[in-house]
Image (cartoon, grey):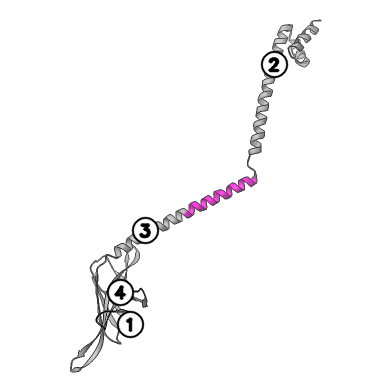
Amino acid sequence: MGLVRVERAAVEAGITRQMMLLLFPFGLSADQIVWWGFIATVVAALCAVWGGIAATAAAKYGKDAPTKEDLKRVEGHVYHLEEVKSSITRMDTRLDRQEEREAVQARARQISLSITGRADVGDQMAVRLIMRDTAVTPTRVELFNENGTRFAGSFDCRKLETLLFEVELDADSVRQWYNGGRPTEAFNRRLLTFRVYTILYEQEVYREAPVELTQGTRHTSGYPTYSIEVFTLKGNV
C-alpha cells in the first residue's frame, strides 16, 4: 500500500515511475521521494533546455561556418587587397622618385656657365665650358634649336682643368645646327640651345643655355684680300 500511495503522489507531482523506483530503495518517505523526484525533474528539465540551446547554436553556427568555396573567395579578396596595397606602395615610390628628380632638376637649372667656341667652316669646333661651381661636372652636351629639335647626337665633355671643360663638335653637326637655328636681325646669326648634362646627387640632369652661333669671315695673315668663313659660338647663363 505504501508503494501505491507513493506512486500516486509521484504521478501527481509529475514524477515518472522509473524515477520513483530509483529513489524508493533508499528508505525515503513518500514525501521525501516526491520532493527529491521533483528536484530531479527540474534538473532534468533545465539540462534539456540548455541542451536545446546548445543544439540550436551549433546548428546556427554550423550553418554559417565558411565552406571551402567561401574560403577561396576570401583568399581571392585578400590577394586582391594585397595587390592594391602593393600598387599603392609602388605608386608612392614612383611619386617620391619623381619629386626627388624634379627637385634635382630644379637645382640643375641654377647652374652657371659660359660657352665659347670658334672654328673655320668645315673644321671641327672645340667648345670651351667654364663652370662656376666645382661640385658640378659636365658629362656630355646636345644641340637643340629653340623649338626643341635635336641635331646630331651627344658629345662627351673632357676636363682640361678645374672648372674648365671642352667639347669637340664635328663640322657637319655645326652646319646642320646653324641651319636649324632662328635668325636674328643680323642675317648671319642664329639663336640656338646648348644642353649640358651633369651628375647631381647621383642623377643625370641637364642645364639648357641659350647661345648664338654666328657665321662670319676672318682674314689670313699675308693675304689681306683673302678671307675664310668661320663659325663663332657664345653663350652665358
Q: Which mark is residue 122?
A: none
- Secondary structure category for the residue under label 1: helix
Say above or below: 190 vs 69. Answer: below
Q: Which residue is mark 1?
A: 179
Measure the C-alpha gap from mark 2 to mark 3: 81 Å
Q: Which residue is mark 3?
A: 99
Q: Which mark is residue 194?
A: 4
Measure the C-alpha gap from mark 1 to mark 3: 37 Å
- Secondary structure category for the residue under label 3: helix
Say above or below: 58 vs 202. Answer: above
Viewer-nearest residue: 39 or 214: 214
Q: Residues within 10 Å of mark 3 (few under 14, many from 20)?
A: few
Q: Amino acid at mark 1?
A: Asn
Say above or below: 74 vs 152. Answer: above
Measure the C-alpha gap from mark 1 to mark 4: 15 Å
Q: Residues within 10 Å of mark 1 (few under 14, many from 20)?
A: few
Q: Nearer the viewer, mark 1 or mark 3?
A: 1
Between discs 4 and 3, the one toward the N terminus: 3
Q: Residues within 10 Å of mark 4 (few under 14, many from 20)?
A: many
- Secondary structure category for the residue under label 4: strand
Any magenta on residue 69?
Answer: yes
Q: Nearer the viewer, mark 4 or mark 2?
A: 4
